[in-house]
Image: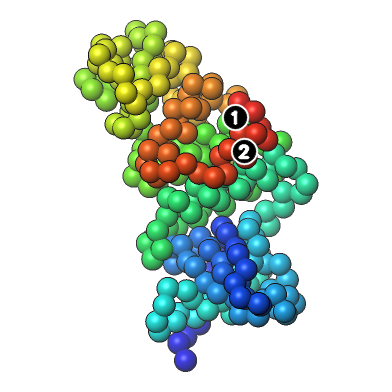
Amino acid sequence: MPSEETTAAIVLRASNYGEADRIVTLLTRDRGKLAGIARGIRKSRGRFERRLEPFAHVWLSFRWRRHGELVFITRAEAGNLAAFELGADLRKFALGAYMLELSEALTREGAQSIGAYELLAQALDTLCRSDCPNALKQVFELKMLRWAGYGIDFSRCRGCGCDIGRDDARVAFAINEGGLLCERCRRGRVWGMVLLERPSVLQLQRLDALSLEASGTEPPATPEASTSLNRFISFVLERNLRSLEFLQRTIPNI
């Protein structure tokens, strides 16, 4: 029988399978993103006690299958891990669900993802202990994008390399290039651009330098800056995140 492994994990998604089983996707500390099956969970809940629901933070025990992509989940225990209790706050649930989906989209099964796991854990902990700061969304997005290799330089023009934010009253976020273009470099370009006023650029620079914990003291990004990030993430993923629409209905102008 294959040996059992244990790692800290955050449940990203769960769905019923067959009459009694559940398929669970998790972001683990030591094994990257994993998809597993919990046999009989819906007939014998005492073994898992709702520890395989989205947002659960658990010590996951599992065995690799000889064939197939799903691991066998044998146990899930809370242990000494931080619990992400969102309560009945719909705003926190909507933002948390968006964080889970973005984390799943930017990670790959079998790839080393300890940085993504730590970012998600810190973001959910901040969300639980705060009054749902809107800036947390943008700070989390920027850090996750940077971890995934899509970091954005808000200080220099992507075209000529000049400093951004000093002389230009308006610049452009080039979606397909993942960076800003100064007023001179953006001339003549129309497709894939979001125009940003100077205050929006300065705020993106501040948000990019913030820690997740400090996001509660910063106002959210301006609508045009938030639109830039949303469109860039859709470009990177080649699709829209389903949770974004729900989030924007729940927290307008986020």
Count every numbered label the image shows and give the total: 2
Q: Which residue is located at x 72 percent, y 52 percent?
A: 85
197 lies above or below 130: above
Q: Secondary structure at mark 2?
A: helix
**Disc 2 + disc 1, Cβ < 8 Å:** yes
Q: Nearer the viewer, residue 5 or 64?
A: 64
Q: Residues within 10 Å of mark 2 (few under 14, many from 20)?
A: many
Q: Nearer the viewer, residue 183 or 16?
A: 16
On screen, residue 94 versus residue 195, left or right, reads right
CA distance separating discs 2 and 1: 8 Å
Q: Which residue is denoted by mark 2 in the rendering?
A: 247
Residue farthest to the right, as pictured: 88
42 lies above or below 95: below
On screen, residue 57 versus residue 205, left or right, reads right
The image shows residue 33 at horizontal and vertical percentages of 46, 62
243 lies above or below 231: below
Amino acid type of disc 2? Answer: Leu
Q: Which residue is denoted by mark 1 in the rendering?
A: 254
The image shows residue 148 at horizontal and vertical percentages of 38, 47
Q: Which residue is located at x 69 percent, y 39 percent?
A: 91
Q: Secondary structure at mark 1?
A: loop
Q: Is residue 146 visible?
A: no
